[in-house]
Amino acid sequence: MDEKRVYYKSEKISVSFAPSVCIHAAECIKGLPNVFDTSKKPWVNVAGANPEEIIEVIDMCPSGALKYELIDYELELEKKKMEKTKITVMPNGPLMIEGNLTVNKMSGENIKDGEKLFLCRCGHSANKPFCDGSHKKEDFKAE
């Protein structure tokens, strides 16, 4: 998949967006409308909140279309101290897995590396094992 990214930078954080990856869950818009506003150009305003708030919302992006890189060294060190693998079951949606992650096929071939991945729970994804947002179209309800 082509991951051309658009970058938005401040002195402390760089936010990137890959339009071709976005599944339009709108977690960013709901989470921080002062930063993420599709009615404005540019639609990402990194000066609209502090880096910690921006990171918290980007971490909720189900597709990984939004990513960040800390420019401030102290913030980066603090983030590394808090790193551990975390799995979150999203209501009626995918499994969100956060950490230093690698997904391999049984053959050992690498499929994807990342800090946050979303795995399909509904069984309808065309991009298994990853979520592609099909749970919304299929009205998936977890029991």
Image (spheres, rainbow, N blue to C red):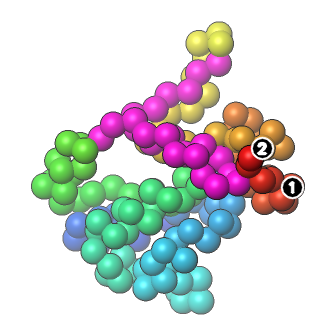
Would residue 92 be counted in the magenta stretch?
A: yes
| Amino acid marked by disc 2 | Cys
Mark sitting on residue 138: 1
Along the horizontal axis of the image, is 100 left or right of 88?
Answer: left
Along the horizontal axis of the image, is 55 left or right of 93?
Answer: left
Quadrant location of the N terminus?
A: top right
Q: Residue at x 61, y 28 (%)?
A: 111
Asked if disc 1 and disc 2 are in contact, CB closer than 8 Å, the reply is yes
Residue 54 lies, in percent from the top left, at 37, 68
Q: Residue at x 69, y 60 (%)?
A: 23
10 Å neighbourhood of mark 1: few (<14), some, or many (≥20)? few
In the foreground, 26 or 111: 26
| Amino acid marked by disc 1 | Glu
Q: Which residue is mark 2?
A: 122
Residue 114 lies, in percent from the top left, at 47, 39
Range drawn in magenta: 83-105
